[in-house]
Image: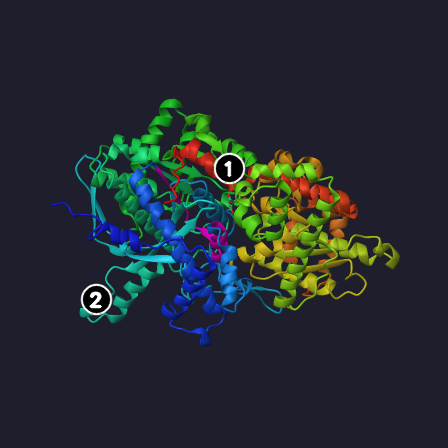
């Protein structure tokens, strides 16, 4: 018969259920309880780290109350769900965010204090969960926060890397060194191991077609176990607590017994190693792909486990498989999870025994694809031999068969629409001819998806007119849309800038949970720009945030920062297209200019402190050389008695989410200076502006939309526009003009570096030559207008009052850039899912 749930007395279960801790006393009790039982320690031997762990476990208990209610509610209501598949989730720290979203921060602060600790100190004990490289991974984290805050039934799926993005060290010469990031060493209180939720994932093996059915069987090869770890994602001002499910790979049987019995002990251990290796490390490359087998294994392992899990949940609904797209929407974050398309085809055709056409209809109504870049080096391609021939390493061979079948049908349709256009067929094919042949993942993702989107207006337009042009002509333009990125104001204002958050609530006269969830409410600040007292408070908070950053630099690097200078910040991955080179060459130009001045003239200038932070991909030589140059320029100019009161420079090592939380609120101006058309969106630009920092940038990515919101008089724009870029590159190659002619100022800077002003005779030549030669990123073309923009910033800053007004106006107009707006757009225009609030019990 049917089992009765709950077993035993329902009343007892209910009475004994845990509720949220809401008062200081029960919080203190729960923390002490964890000290004693979970950590097996006592009042006499507990330090800050232990106190952090106990507090975290107690907060986790509270999160679990809401998480359980949410999952039960979703199961009972059975709404359509969305799944966000991302190879990266750059979460940062959790404790502070959880306390704020639960609304329990002040209670925990008091409770922790009663136990003799300070909440501020124990928050610092937490290590970042750094399972991402940069913008793409942090965007995924912001979307999870927004999905919970907006009561949307959404889960994230990713990998539980044992090592996150590497730790960056700077050698005495100024070189970047990479060290592993063993973030799980201290145990992770924020995850729930679900040792009961596992799937087998098959690699290699052999696929055999069954007659003409289109079906195949697939057997043999290596089987790896995927084990689920769940991370709770609390919403702000709601009970809804979503889930991020991360997969860990494990050998299916601890040992391969056959090899063991055959006396091959080492071989047996190796096979268990290779299974565990799949989720051992995040690939540290941003915007570049290498056809590495392990990366392909990661992608397949993760998509296969996630799809199996999604399918199992769908099957529990008892609906026919044809209704799959009515209950499931899957967002592919970049092309990384594109193997989900052939994998779902495999399941539907081989296991569910659907006809190919029927299966294809389901697939193309389930998936949605976000593109994050038009840079060619970032578009994923996998060599066919890696997917097929490389014996005995036939990574999912069956999937290649399916990809070929998809391609054949697709190209037939293209041929029908554009008869005889062979070039077009070659461009649109999923397979790129050449040695070796390659699988173009963006083409596959586009063909297998219902909708494709870019991440800012300009970028989406570039997607339509460049990389997806042929596909627009084939499918029509409506398949290609835009969702401008967003950021969560919970972490990126309330958490990182608590004083400003308090001032905003006070000024607007509303509770913060209201404006944090409807960020357009910030516009109400505009009515107060003429209020001198408000402006003074605004400026004083910025000043204290600058002092907080200076304190951080003092305690971590032992350096004293002049907090009365303007703080100018560029923090992001090191990349030629982001042009940290333009910035550092600008700094050198400023230094040379100051040196040439009399002491009296210098006194009239605007003192400036320049901060850089960011990691370079370990194999990216030019990016690493740029770091070295920054570090060595800093050394010289910070030591120069003539200029050091007017200009100083810091490279802060090991950039992370937590460091960003200190840097962003402290900035007066931040730089987003990519070559026009190269930065798809950028998201830190939004974070700085939300915190009242002004923007210096090129007409690129989301900078454009920020300027549209805040008005061009409140941003500093410079440089060539996107349509000019190609022509300029062409000129560089075929009609080059020497740097001396184009920009004497820049030529002088380059010569000074070459001449060894910053030591290191000769080492920077390869970097300087990228500029002197083809100058692909247009440093020479934009240098002079960049310098004038910097001068305009200085001039504007001298009028303090007007500057503060600009700052307030900027924050006030950032409503559009909340990730709540973006996630609701996906929910309504793409996934067709509904807000499903969990009733408060
Ligand atoms: C990309 C882009 C950024 C974008 C981010 C999120 O380079 O411009 O803001 O994704 O969409 N790979 C990235 O970081």
Position of the N terminus, as image quadrant, is top left
The residue that mark 1 highlights is 821
Q: Position of residue 538 (x, y in %)?
A: 69, 48
Please, is residue 453 above or below residue 768 in the view?
above
Q: Which residue is mark 2?
A: 259
Q: Nearer the viewer, residue 615 or 207?
A: 615
Q: Find residue 58 and report its horizontal and vertical position in percent.
A: 41, 60
The CB of the residue at mark 1 lies under 8 Å from ligand 1: no
Q: Quadrant of residue 238 in the image? A: top left
Q: Quadrant of the C terminus?
A: top left
Q: Residues within 10 Å of mark 2 (few under 14, many from 20)?
A: some
In magenta, the rendered stretch is 81-101
Residue at mark 2: C-beta within 8 A of ligand 1: no
Q: Is residue 155 magenta?
A: no
Report helix, strand or loop for mark 1: helix
Based on the picture, tell me whether residue 83 belongs to the magenta stretch: yes
**Residue found 61% across the figure and 61% down from its top:** 652
Q: Nearer the viewer, residue 238 or 130?
A: 238
Query: Is the residue 715 above or below the residue 224 in the image?
Result: above
Quadrant of the image occupied by residue 265: bottom left
Of all residues shown, which one is farthest toward the bottom?
A: 44
Residue 356 has which mark?
none
Nearer to us of marks 2 and 1 is 1
In the picture, measured across the screen, residue 204 lies left or right of residue 176, that is: left
């Amino acid at each position: 018969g049917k089992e009765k749930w709950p077993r035993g007395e329902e009343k007892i279960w209910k009475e004994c259920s845990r509720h949220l801790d809401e008062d200081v006393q029960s919080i203190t009790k729960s923390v002490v309880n964890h000290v004693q039982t979970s950590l097996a320690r006592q009042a006499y031997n507990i330090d800050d780290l232990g106190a952090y762990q106990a507090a975290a476990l107690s907060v986790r208990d509270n999160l679990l109350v809401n998480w359980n209610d949410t999952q039960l509610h979703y199961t009972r209501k059975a709404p359509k769900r969305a799944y966000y598949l991302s190879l990266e989730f750059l979460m940062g720290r959790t404790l502070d965010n959880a306390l704020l979203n639960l609304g329990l921060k002040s209670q925990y602060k008091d409770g922790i204090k009663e136990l003799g600790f300070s909440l501020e100190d124990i928050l610092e004990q937490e290590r970042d969960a750094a399972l991402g490289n940069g913008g793409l991974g942090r965007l995924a984290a912001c979307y999870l926060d927004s999905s919970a805050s907006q009561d949307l039934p959404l889960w994230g799926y990713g990998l539980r890397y044992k090592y996150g993005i590497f730790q960056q060290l700077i050698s005495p010469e100024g070189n970047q060194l990479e060290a592993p990031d063993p973030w799980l060493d201290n145990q992770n209180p924020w995850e729930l191991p679900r040792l009961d939720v596992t799937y087998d994932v098959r690699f290699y093996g052999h696929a055999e077609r069954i007659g003409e059915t289109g079906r195949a069987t697939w057997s043999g090869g290596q089987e790896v176990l995927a084990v689920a770890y769940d991370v709770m994602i609390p919403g702000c001002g709601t009970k809804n607590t979503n889930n991020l499910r991360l997969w860990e790979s494990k050998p299916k049987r601890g040992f391969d017994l056959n090899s063991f019995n055959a006396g091959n002990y080492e071989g047996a251990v190796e096979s268990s190693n290779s299974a565990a290796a799949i989720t051992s490390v995040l690939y540290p490359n941003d915007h570049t792909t290498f056809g590495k087998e392990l990366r392909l294994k990661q992608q397949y392992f993760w998509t296969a486990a996630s799809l199996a899990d999604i399918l199992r949940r769908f099957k529990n609904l008892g609906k026919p498989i044809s209704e799959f797209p009515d209950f499931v929407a899957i967002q592919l974050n970049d092309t990384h999870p594109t193997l989900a398309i052939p994998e779902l085809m495999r399941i539907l055709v081989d296991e569910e025994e659907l006809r190919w056409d029927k299966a294809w209809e389901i697939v193309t109504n389930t998936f949605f694809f976000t593109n994050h870049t038009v840079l060619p080096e970032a578009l994923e391609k996998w060599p066919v031999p890696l997917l097929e021939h490389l014996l005995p390493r036939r990574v999912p061979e069956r999937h290649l068969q399916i990809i070929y079948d998809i391609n054949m049908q697709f190209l037939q349709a293209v041929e029908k629409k554009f008869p005889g256009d062979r070039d077009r067929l070659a461009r649109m094919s999923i397979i790129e001819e050449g040695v070796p042949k390659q699988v173009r993942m963006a083409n596959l993702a586009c063909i297998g998806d219902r909708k494709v989107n870019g991440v800012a207006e300009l970028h989406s337009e570039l997607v339509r007119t460049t990389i997806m042009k042929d596909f627009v002509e084939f499918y029509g333009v409506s398949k290609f849309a835009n969702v401008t990125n967003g950021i969560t104001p919970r972490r990126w204002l309330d958490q990182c800038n608590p004083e400003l958050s308090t001032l905003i609530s006070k000024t607007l006269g509303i509770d913060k949970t209201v404006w944090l969830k409807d960020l357009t409410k910030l516009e109400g600040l505009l009515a107060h720009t003429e209020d001198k007292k408000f402006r003074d408070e605004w400026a004083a908070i910025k000043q204290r945030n600058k002092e907080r950053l200076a304190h951080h630099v003092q305690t971590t690097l032992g350096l004293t920062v002049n907090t009365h200078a303007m703080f100018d910040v560029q923090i992001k991955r090191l990349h030629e297209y982001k042009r940290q080179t333009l910035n550092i060459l600008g700094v050198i130009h400023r230094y040379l200019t100051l040196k040439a001045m009399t002491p009296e003239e210098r006194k009239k200038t605007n003192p400036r402190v320049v901060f850089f932070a960011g990691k370079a991909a370990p194999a990216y030589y030019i990016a690493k050389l740029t770091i070295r140059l920054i570090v060595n320029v800093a050394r010289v100019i910070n030591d120069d008695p003539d200029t050091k009161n007017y200009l100083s420079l810091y490279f802060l090592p090991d950039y992370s989410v937590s460091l960003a939380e200190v840097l962003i609120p402290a900035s007066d101006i931040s730089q987003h200076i990519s070559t026009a058309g190269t930065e798809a969106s950028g998201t830190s630009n939004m974070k700085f502006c939300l915190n009242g920092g002004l923007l210096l940038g090129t007409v690129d990515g989301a900078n454009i939309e920020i300027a549209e919101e805040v008005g061009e008089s409140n941003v500093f724009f410079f440089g060539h526009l996107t349509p000019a870029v190609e022509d300029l590159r062409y000129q560089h190659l075929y009609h080059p003009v020497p740097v001396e002619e184009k920009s004497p100022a820049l030529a002088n800077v380059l010569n000074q570096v070459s001449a060894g002003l910053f030591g290191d005779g000769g080492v920077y030549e390869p970097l300087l030559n990228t500029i002197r030669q083809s100058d692909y990123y247009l440093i020479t073309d934009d240098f002079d207008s960049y310098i004038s923009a910097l001068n305009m910033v200085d001039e504007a800053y001298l009028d303090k009052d007007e500057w503060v007004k600009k700052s307030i106006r900027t924050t006030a107009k950032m409503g559009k850039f909340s990730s709540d707006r973006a996630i609701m757009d996906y929910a309504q225009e793409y996934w067709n899912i509904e807000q499903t609030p969990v009733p408060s019990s």
